[in-house]
């Protein structure tokens, strides 16, 4: 599977509202939903998390 994000931003194939943040915590690996389209297009910041060292953000691509 490919990535829906590049250094310049989202690709046309990205599913931005299905993005995930993965973060190591004291209780193990946690995942948090990120609704990138809502953040970028609508200014809704509920899922806008400050990134920390070792965080991983994934943005899936649409299946055709």
Image (tube, rainbow, N blue to C red):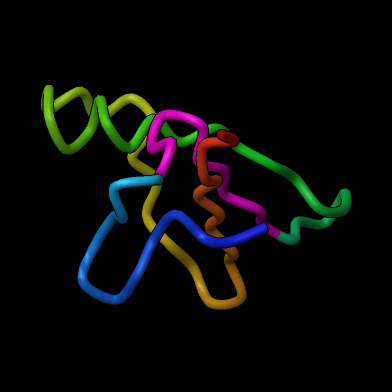
* x then y, percent, for residue 56: 59, 64
Q: Is residue 19 above or below residue 35?
A: below
Q: Is residue 4 above or below residue 62?
A: below
| Residue extending farthest right | 27
Q: In the rendered picture of this protein, how many numbered marks are placed on residues?
A: 0
* 34 left or right of 38 in image: right
| Residue extending farthest front | 64
Residue at the (41%, 29%) spot, across then down: 17
The quarter of the rendered structure image containing the C terminus is top right
The quarter of the rendered structure image containing the N terminus is bottom right
Residue 38 quadrant? top left
Residue at the (24%, 62%) spot, across then down: 9
**Does the magenta segment cover residue 55?**
no
Q: Is residue 8 above or below residue 45?
A: below
Residue at the (58%, 66%) spot, across then down: 55
Nearer to the camera, 64 or 26: 64
**Does the magenta segment cover residue 17?**
yes
* x then y, percent, for residue 34: 45, 36
Residue at the (55%, 46%) spot, across then down: 60
Q: Please report the bounds of the magenta region as a residue range.
A: 14-23
* x then y, percent, for residue 24: 74, 61
* 9 left or right of 33 in image: left
Nearer to the camera, 25 or 40: 40
């Amino acid at each position: 599977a490919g990535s829906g994000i590049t250094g310049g931003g989202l690709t046309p194939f990205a599913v931005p509202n299905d993005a995930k943040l993965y973060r190591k915590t004291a209780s193990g690996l946690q995942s948090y939903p990120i609704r990138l389209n809502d953040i970028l297009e609508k200014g809704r910041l509920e899922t806008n998390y400050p990134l920390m060292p070792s965080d991983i953000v994934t943005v899936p691509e649409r299946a055709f």
